[in-house]
Amino acid sequence: MKKVVFITGATGFIGTHLVNANLKIGNEVIAFVLPNDLNISFLKENNVDIRYGDIRNYEEVEKALSEEVEIVFHCAAFVSDWGNADLFKAVMINGTENVCKAASKAKVERFVKISTNDVFGLDESTIINETTPLSKWNEPYSDTKIAAEDMAWHYFKTEKLPVTMVYPCWVYGPGDKTFVPLLADAILKKEMVFMRKNAIVWPTYIDNLVDLLMLISKDDRAIGEGFLVHDGESTTLEKFTNGVAKAIGGKEVKQYIPYWIAFFAAFLMEIIWKLLKKKERPLLTTYTVKNLGSRLKFSIEKAKNLLNWTPKITYSEGFKTTMEWLVKQNFDQLKQK
């Protein structure tokens, strides 16, 4: 049965793939995008209902999220390792509250919120699953994601908003605007260094993530639950990075600097950048050091057991497809500034 789907962040990496997945099965898609968004050509080409506004403005969200909406995918976020703290709060926390409030008023059937595996903290001594307590990184991106999640669960408890939380790990794939293009750019500029041997990454191929999101949007067992998602296997940052280097014709990355030196350098850079009120991101941030220097372990057993879901694309298949796409791209145009 056709559904009316409302997608925030519809022109982003995840949002774009979600739009396509919903159109493919015949759903009617309403894309909520910023008035100055220049990446809407594919929406127009597919006759998507484009509604302009900013999630920071409740009146604009309420007007766009009309009563015919049945499913909400809340993908919009300020995705960065660096930025103004007030902007993070306004987009992540206030924006989420506005979308929750409007969705509650519209009495939607599903509210699927894209969170992040970051919300579970940095404890390497355990296998992290959905019962792991949320834990701050003392970083604006991950910490406001926790606050946004708390907001969504508040509406679940008080307004009976049918919330499902999804925690993707490292999302990659064709159309990526952050992770893989930035990594490729750093490799070519010889700026990439490792901060810890055998740091672990949990790749999440975009098609696997979208497959789970689409299942969640129609499975009643998902309401009130949260789900971690990745490709079902981990790799090391060295293997992932040098796989990218090989694909794009870059040199193998062998440089290491001790974690504590990298963290201290990032800490100093951030202080200097703030004092000088620089708008561009520092060469290195404390968030990046924590992220690229971790050996965290994540389980997706809950999605397997409760929803009978398994990743359809293996990591090797997803990586191969992504590299075939990457070598055809202009990295400077891809990178999200």
Image (tube, helix red, strand yellow):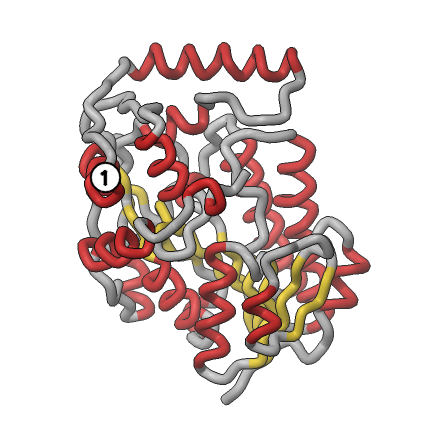
x and y percentages locating residue 116 in the rendered image: 44, 46
Residue visible at 71% across and 53% down? 36
Tell me if residue 20 comes above or below residue 224 in the rendering. Answer: below
Kindly give the residue lying farthest to the bottom in the view shown: 1
Dot 1 falls on a residue whose secondary structure is loop
Kindly give the residue lying farthest to the right in the view shown: 59
Residue visible at 33% across and 12% down? 260
Picture quadrant where residue 178 is located: top left
Tell me if residue 122 comes above or below residue 319 in the rendering. Answer: above
x and y percentages locating residue 325 in the rendered image: 32, 56
Few, some or many residues within 10 Å of mark 1 (<14, 14–19, 20+) = few
Along the line of sight, which residue is nearer the eye, 127 or 144?
Answer: 144
Look at label 1 and name its amino acid: Gly
Q: Give the residue at mark 1.
A: 249
Along the line of sight, which residue is nearer the eye, 253 or 59?
Answer: 253
Picture quadrant where residue 51 is located: bottom right
Q: Is residue 143 visible?
A: yes
Q: Is residue 237 left or right of residue 136?
A: left
Q: Is residue 117 left or right of residue 270?
A: left
x and y percentages locating residue 131 in the rendered image: 37, 48
